Image (spheres, rainbow, N blue to C red):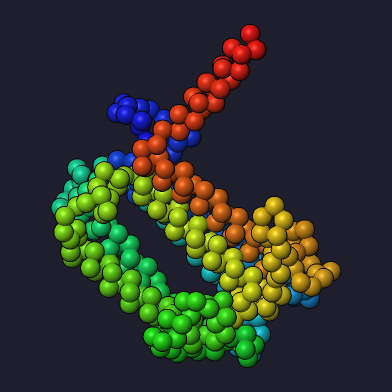
Amino acid sequence: MQTYGNPDVTYGWWAGNSRVTNRAGKFIAAHAGHTGLISFAAGASTLWELARFDPSIAMGHQSSIFLAHLASIGIGFDDAGVWTGANVASVAIVHIIASLVYAGGALSHSLLFDGDLADGPGPTTQKFKLEWDNPDNLTFILGHHLIFFGVACIAFVEWARIHGIYDPAIGAVRQVEYNLNLTNIWNHQFDFLAIDNLEDVLGGHAFLAFVEITGGAFHIATKQVGEYTEFKGARILSAEAVLSFSLAGIGWMAIVAAFWCATNTTVYPEAWFGEPLALKFGISPYWIDTVEVTESTALAGHTTRAALTNVHYYFGFFFLQGHLWHAIRALGFDFRRVTNAVAGLDRAQITLND
């Protein structure tokens, strides 16, 4: 975190990141705790949506965000292929149980285990210590993250291939073989909103898995290649900088997801999310429903797609503002200069009035 030249700076309780900046064990505890909260929220919200679900009203008109995502990956259908909510409660309960496991891990790392992995019990543990201006250390950790992301993509591809996911083109769950066509993948970089078949969707995930796992292995094996220059982060790489990169990535993904959710009915089927939206401009961009949702039981009477799209967009927008704030601080800019300048203007005005 930015110290503005004071090595003994202290932060208030609200500056949560400051408590884990140089303590990898505490950092892991925070990660596990956050994961547990997300898992619990997913499980509990799924049960809440399932309890209030009305089969006489379209799912996309009930703010059933979690049910819609489960239906999209082929969960909740009976043997006849009709969505009945079968096994949805089991999925939710597994998430709630998992949240307790994550909570236990978070408490263990926070209260029992060493807060700094540099003093960990073995050489493997010590490899994951946090040294923010050590490119070898950070690229080693980045490599493992990339491999985990790649494995997640493989899991999704294999789920679609073996179990099957919902295909809005036929209105049923079917097994999908990925189409690993590099030409199509390249072309869809520019028109991904128009993707209209699941084979291309899964092909993109398969390609992404390959890239992420290969990149992860490269980072783990090679670490820092060549001289550590300013271009590679020298005198810039810090906890503040890494936080800014993370906010930029998640902010951009949220905005892309908003545009995709608003218009694409292959990845976000109309049967589960509601009708496509129209983009409007006011003080800022926003999306509105294109049909009258008279029977909606959703908040403010909008479709699931409208809620999901707008929330993603505005979260993404504010994440990017956070990215700019932390990136500028990481570069060394002292924001106190702004407040001091404003205070100086006020004092000058008072002097002139006197």
Q: Where's residue 205, x and y in %? A: 42, 78
Q: Closer to the camera, 4 or 216?
A: 4
**Which image quadrant is residue 236 in?**
top left
Image position of 193 with respect to 296: above or below = below
Classify the position of the N terminus by image quarter.
top left
Q: Closer to the camera, 168 or 123?
A: 168
Residue furthest to the front in view is 352
Q: Where's residue 9, x and y in %? A: 35, 27
Name the residue located 43 percent from the left edge and 82 percent from the top edge.
Answer: 185
Residue furthest to the right in view is 294
In the picture, measured across the screen, residue 221 lies left or right of residue 2, that is left
Image position of 83 with respect to 330: above or below = below
Name the residue located 79 percent from the left edge and 67 percent from the top edge.
Answer: 296
Q: Closer to the camera, 64 or 194?
A: 194
Instruction: Give the total of numbered labels.
Output: 0
Does residue 113 appear in the picture of this structure? no
**Which image quadrant is residue 183 in?**
bottom left
Q: Where's residue 94, x and y in %? A: 50, 65
Does residue 286 appear in the picture of this structure? yes
Q: Where's residue 326, x and y in %? A: 43, 44
Name the residue located 50 percent from the left edge and 76 percent from the top edge.
Answer: 190
